[in-house]
Amino acid sequence: MTNLKVNTGGGEYLFGDLGSMGLTSYHRFDKAYPKANISAYIGNQKYMTDTIATYAYMQYMGLMKITYSIWVQGNKLVISSVTPDDTIKIK
């Protein structure tokens, strides 16, 4: 994946390139929710999650590190899990 971009409703961040089964570093967003707008290119094809227009009524994740696990299904990205990492304390 190239040009991996994440918008959590509390900002947008360009993570750059990510290989298969790869991991990115954490990035601090002002807010994060269980769903996010994520997009990336594989070759010349753009893949993205279903667009979230509003984060109203979603549970705010709070001050913690979370991991969005994504995979490709058909012509879109799917968030397969959202995992809070409670072993890492935010200072």
Image: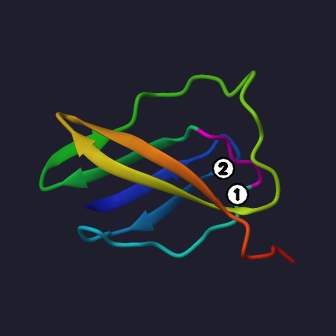
Quadrant containing the C terminus is bottom right
Is residue 52 shown left or right of residue 66? left
Closest to the observer, 5 or 19 = 19
Main SS of the magenta segment? Answer: loop
Quadrant containing the N terminus is bottom left
Q: Position of residue 49 (x, y in %)?
A: 39, 36
Above or below, 85 against 39 in this view is below
Above or below, 20 against 9 in this view is below
The kind of residue on which mark 1 rests is Phe
Q: How dense is the environment of label 2, judged by Cα within 10 Å: few (below 14), some, or many (20 and up)?
A: few
Assign a secondary structure to mark 1: loop
Q: Position of residue 22 (x, y in %)?
A: 33, 72
Assign a secondary structure to mark 2: loop
Q: How many marks?
A: 2
Q: Which residue is mark 2?
A: 11
Q: Position of residue 56 (x, y in %)?
A: 73, 22
The kind of residue on which mark 2 rests is Gly
Q: Would you identify the image quadrant in which residue 36 lies?
A: top right
Residue at 48% of width from left, 61% of height from top?
14
Q: Which residue is mark 1?
A: 29
Is residue 18 shown left or right of residue 68? left
Q: Residue furthest right?
A: 91
Label 1 vs label 2, nearer the camera: 1
Q: Cα distance, mark 1 to mark 2?
A: 6 Å
> What residue span does the magenta drawing correspond to?
30-34
Q: Position of residue 38 (x, y in %)?
A: 44, 45
Q: Earlier in the sequence, mark 1 or mark 2?
A: 2
Q: Pointers 1 and 2 in contact (CB under 8 A)? A: yes
Closest to the observer, 86 or 18 = 86
Q: Residue furthest front?
A: 87
Q: Would you identify the image quadrant in which residue 9 lies?
A: top right
